[in-house]
Amino acid sequence: FYNLAVDRPGSDSQRFGAEKESIAVGAADVCDHVAGGDDVHPEHVLFYIHHVDVSTLTLQFRCLGDATVLHNATDAREGPLRPGDTIQVGDTSFRFLSIE
C-alpha cells in the first residue's frame, strides 16, 4: 500500500513496504511498531488506508485516546499523509515514502 521508513535513536533507518490496511504504533508490545518515550501511550496512533470510493485510496493517521503526534513538526491528532510527511511518536520517527 505504501512505503515507510522508521528512524529510532541509535539505530539504522528501517524501510519497508506496508502491506496491511492499518498499522498501530504505541508503547504496547501488541502494536505493529513499538515507540519509546515518556509521553507515548500504549496505543498511540493508527496509520490506515481510507477508501474514498471504489478506485480512490488515501493514507490517513488518527491518534487514539488523548494522544497527539508531531505531523511535519506540528502538533496534530489526525489528517492525511503524503509522500515526504513525517510523524514523530516519542523517540521514533515515521517517514512516508513514495511507492516505487
Image (cartoon, helix red, strand yellow):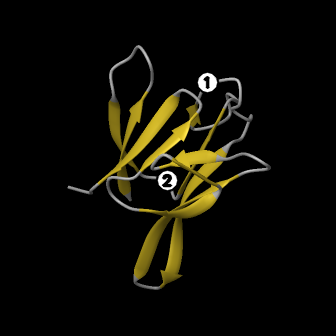
Q: Residue 10: x and y, percent?
A: 41, 13
Q: Name the side, left or right, on which 95 lies relative to 68.
A: left
Residue at left offset 67%, top offset 47%:
68
Residue at left offset 39%, top offset 53%:
85
The quarter of the rendered structure image containing the N terminus is bottom left
Q: Residue 15: x and y, percent?
A: 32, 36
Residue at left offset 41%, top offset 80%:
56
Q: How many marks can you see?
A: 2
Residue at left offset 38%, top offset 17%:
11
Residue type, label 2: Lys
Q: Name the side, left or right, on which 67 lies relative to 36.
A: right
Crowding around mark 2 (Cα neighbors within 10 Å: few <14, some 14 to 19, many 20+) is few
Q: Name the residue under label 2.
A: 20
Q: Mark 1 points at which residue?
A: 36
Residue type, label 1: Gly
Q: Residue 8: x and y, percent?
A: 45, 24
Which label's residue is closer to the chain start, 2 or 1?
Answer: 2
Q: Distance between the residues labelled 2 and 1?
A: 22 Å
Name the element at disc 2. loop
Q: Relative to the observer, which residue lies in front, 54 or 87?
A: 87
Q: Name the side, left or right, on which 26 lies relative to 94.
A: right
Name the element at disc 1. loop
Q: Relative to the observer, which residue lies in front, 78 or 24?
A: 78
* Residue 5 position (above or below residue 52): above
The quarter of the rendered structure image containing the C terminus is bottom left
